[in-house]
Image (cartoon, grey):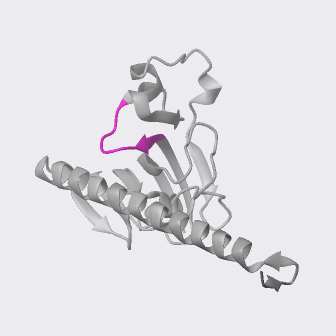
Amino acid sequence: MRRVAGISFCALAALSLFLSCSKASREATFATQETRIASYIDSEVKAGATFTDLGGVYRIIYEEGSGEALQETGVVTFYYAAYVFSGSKSVSNLIATNRKETAGSAGWDTADESRYQSLTVSLEEAEFVDGLKRGLVGVKANQHASVVFSGRYGFGGKIYGKVPANAALLYEIWVVAVTN
């Protein structure tokens, strides 16, 4: 058996095969998610929404905003509802929100008002997943939209709280203000 830097050739080959199969499996998962996202966008457009393709991240616009569009270095104030996306948006997939109305309709406790305040962040400094950050660039004040993307632009292979590894995500957002 040939050894390479203390590792047998067979072990190295097995590791390589595992990683390539794992990558192929992950890519298949993303492809399935992207098909579901396309179907969801089609249904939202049929219901009157518009959408923007941001290179694998999609912003579905329900209500147009006004004023200047958020730039990558701007500050945005907004409410959000985050969902693990498996083809639809439902209260059973809701993982986080700072919007009291959304929390209440999901049956969450809304007594603590401090949990339901708008979020103000510098987009440049925000530690958001790539998909959300990309989806926020270009939003305008008073816009109501969703940002949806495959696990490719989410938390990746890591489990994050209630979010499974490689999960597709949808963030419904209500933009209050934009400052560049």
Q: Is residue 88 magenta?
A: yes
Q: Nearer the viewer, residue 40 or 172?
A: 40
Residue at 27% from the left image edge and 58% from the top image edge: 35
Residue at 56% from the left image edge and 50% from the top image edge: 165
Q: Nearer the viewer, residue 129 or 7?
A: 7
Q: How many marks can you see? A: 0
Residue 141, by quadrant, is bottom left
Quadrant assignment for the N terminus:
bottom right
Coordinates of residue 95 in the picture (x, y in percent): 52, 35
Q: Nearer the viewer, residue 1 or 127?
A: 1
Where are the magenta residues, as a range?
81-90
Coordinates of residue 167 in the picture (x, y in percent): 48, 50
Coordinates of residue 115 in the picture (x, y in percent): 62, 29
Q: Is residue 114 magenta?
A: no
Residue at 65% from the left image edge and 76% from the top image edge: 13
Left or right of 66 on screen, residue 166: right
Seen from this angle, which residue lies furthest front?
1
Q: Nearer the viewer, residue 2 or 144?
A: 2
Residue 88, by quadrant, is top left
Seen from this angle, which residue lies furthest right?
6
Coordinates of residue 103 in the picture (x, y in percent): 47, 25
In this rendering, does residue 66 appear at all? no
In this rendering, does residue 89 appear at all? yes
Residue 149, by quadrant, is bottom left
Left or right of 34 on screen, residue 153: right
Residue at 26% from the left image edge and 61% from the top image edge: 51
Above or below — where is 65 with respect to 12? above
Quadrant assignment for the C terminus:
bottom right
